[in-house]
Image (cartoon, coloured by chain):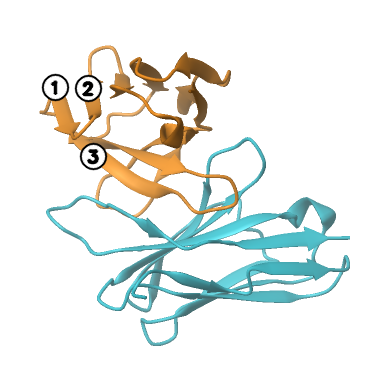
Chain colours: A orange, B cyan
Amino acid sequence: SQKIEQNSEALNIQEGKTATLTCNYTNYSPAYLQWYRQDPGRGPVFLLLIRENEKEKRKERLKVTFDTTLKQSLFHITASQPADSATYLCALDPQGGGFKTIFGAGTRLFVKA
Amino acid sequence: DTGVSQDPRHKITKRGQNVTFRCDPISEHNRLYWYRQTLGQGPEFLTYFQNEAQLEKSRLLSDRFSAERPKGSFSTLEIQRTEQGDSAMYLCASSRRTSGVNEQYFGPGTRLTVT
């Protein structure tokens, strides 16, 4: 079956450290993968998109990697801050063309001051 | 504010009643999506519109669910004969196709509680 898996356990880290979140998928061959942030009671907010021919993408303190052989994406937040505490969702487009997006369940991140 | 808006933000209804939600996408976006999200889960795809055409529909969308986007602008999602299992957050998102990718902008959601 087709699945997207994110670590269901919350990730607790100390302020200033690097947070690393994992997204694994099976039986998909997506052309790109996206990461979103979601705060409680609000809709997701787009953060980064990485294409299959890109190994790494950066935006300020965020870094995403995409390994199509391992079928895995890693999402890093460097110099983490308490304001980074949220749920982070990975998402992919299984068919291409933008008709449908499948989301993982998300990983909750807590950054302690 | 030029973001995606949804109305109402909260809806409490009794089992068996019909409910309708509205989504106003970002004005220049031709793509519109509806999702359902329950606690601890990611958004679950329901349906997709490109302009006024409904091009994709999840098999999760039973006959009790219907969505429209009559003029390619705002969209409505109707749930008939609501059941307690329909209680969830209903999210709308819009996007503008750029180079085949699909960065979506989400609204704040409508939280439905069926009693």
| Residue at 21% across, 50% down | B101
Q: Name the residue under label 1.
A: A55
Residue at 38% x, 24% y is: A27
Which kind of residue does numbered mark 1 sit on?
A: Lys
Indicate the quadrant where residue B56 lies: bottom left
Q: Mark 3 or mark 1, which is nearer the start of the sequence?
A: 3
Estimate the x, y position of residue B97 in percent, counting from the top left.
Answer: 21, 61
Question: Dividing the image into 4 quarters, which one contains the C terminus of chain B?
Answer: bottom right
Disc 1 and disc 2 in contact, CB within 8 angstroms: yes
Asked if residue A112 can be seen in this view, the reply is yes
Q: Which chain contains the residue that carries disc 1?
A: A
> Within 10 Å of the Cα at label 3, are there few (<14), some (14-19), or many (20+) other Cα atoms?
many
Q: In which quarter of the image is the N terminus of chain B?
A: bottom left
Q: Say which amino acid is labelled 2.
A: Thr
Residue type at the position of mark 3: Leu
| Mark closer to the chain start, 1 or 2 | 1
Q: In this view, does B115 lie to the left or right of A48?
A: right
Circle 3 — which element? strand
Q: Report whether B99 appears left or right of B52.
A: left
Residue pictured at 37% horizontal, 79% vertical: B52
Q: Mark 2 points at which residue?
A: A65
Work out whether A77 lies above or below B59. above
**Gap in angstroms between the C-alphas marked 3 and 2:** 10 Å
**Marks 1/3: CA distance?**
12 Å
Q: Say left or right for A66 vs A6.
A: left
Dots 1, 3 in contact, CB < 8 A: no
Q: Which mark is residue A49?
A: 3
Q: Is residue B82 above or below residue A83?
A: below
Q: Determine the secondary structure under disc 2.
A: strand
